[in-house]
Amino acid sequence: MSSSAVSIPSRDRLRPPPSGTLSAPSDAASSTSANGVMPDNAKSVDVHLSHSQCRIYSGCSLQWHLSRRHAPEFVPSGLIFGSSFHAALEAYYQARLEGREAALEELTRAFSTHWADELAGKHGHPPAPVRFTAKDEDEAGMRALASRMLAAFLEHQRQHVSEVIAIEEGFRIKLDSKLPPLVGKIDLIEVETAPDGTSRLCLTDFKTAARKPTLEDLGSDQAQLYGRAAFGMGLVSAFRLPLVLRYLVVTKTKRPEVVMVEVENSPRNWRRLAEKIRQCWRGMRAGVVFPSPSWRCSGCGHSRLCGQWPVMKAAAPPLAASA
């Protein structure tokens, strides 16, 4: 659910999205049958695209295909860790919206609650066993790591002056008439004030990383999509401030660090992303799916079905379902 502030400037100055589009639909069908196969006859599911679907499709089209039709055999621990850490940061900024500061204990509790909910299948996918990626990795160790990372994040925030405008702000934008809407959620919208008193409108995406990342590691696509959404939602015209697109990354290193990586909001970058989205959609519609072996395969929960390709390959997914 989106949460928003009503200050600098008032939210009533923002041009609201079309009725019923504030919350982005999920990336996949929400129900799964007893045998783990996701139904394709969900006519009520609207057709849309998202950054995550295009990212998965461009990385491995077969993984995209299987993830829409089958429950995973397992969920990698890193995936649950990332979503649980995201929930903890969301709890921090929600407290800021409420005019208070969240303590480390509250954030670690939010992390643990989300982790348990993920295991119970309460976030739009069926329960699946967790696969820890390292030999000495376990749930207790990951909770301890999250606590260290959250402590580093809180220390970083003490030096950070900003006004939180919204968290998890849903958007829906139209790229062109031949494509379904692009949907997503902006993790954080804030107005940041520099020591010299100047202000910027910052759209931030939360990430975790095994090491200190560069922009090349992170890519610019998701931030570029945030930027386009900011114009479509009326944020830029309402605030009349320089727009900053960036990632807030907390590292999983022995001594966690918080790294802010800014992305250039350029027309060229957007044109490249828009064309990538168009090509992904064409491939999805045509049923072009095939395996793309890489280092990511060890964390894919569809390895058994992948091994049966191309015998298992079904027809192209129906377009009535969410892309």
Image (cartoon, rainbow, N blue to C red):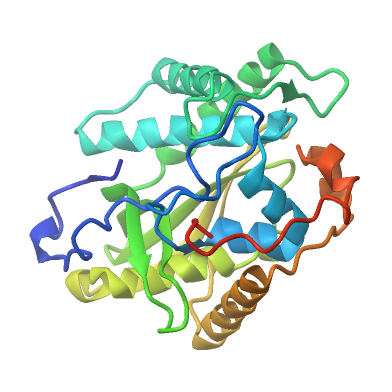
Residue displayed at 33% across by 69% down: 230
User: Which image quadrant for residue 145?
Assistant: top right
User: Residue 158's x, y, as percent?
Assistant: 40, 37
User: Residue 193's x, y, as percent?
Assistant: 30, 58
The reply, left or right, for residue 125 in relation to residue 185 is: right
Residue displayed at 74% across by 16% down: 138
The reply, left or right, for residue 310 in relation to residue 214 is: right
Q: Is residue 137 above or below residue 149?
A: above
Residue displayed at 36% across by 71% down: 173
User: Residue 52's x, y, as percent?
Assistant: 57, 56
User: Which image quadrant for residue 294?
Assistant: bottom right
Front-lying residue, 87 or 89: 87
Quadrant for the C terminus, please.
bottom right
The reply, left or right, for residue 255 in relation to residue 123 is: right
The answer to whether any part of residue 261 appears in the image is no
Front-lying residue, 11 or 175: 175
Front-lying residue, 87 or 65: 65
User: Which image quadrant for residue 133?
Assistant: top right
The reply, left or right, for residue 75 in relation to residue 86 is: right
Q: Could you tell me how many numbered marks the image carries?
A: 0
Residue displayed at 82% across by 50% down: 312
User: Residue 226's x, y, as percent?
Assistant: 43, 65
Q: Is residue 48 above or below residue 180?
A: above
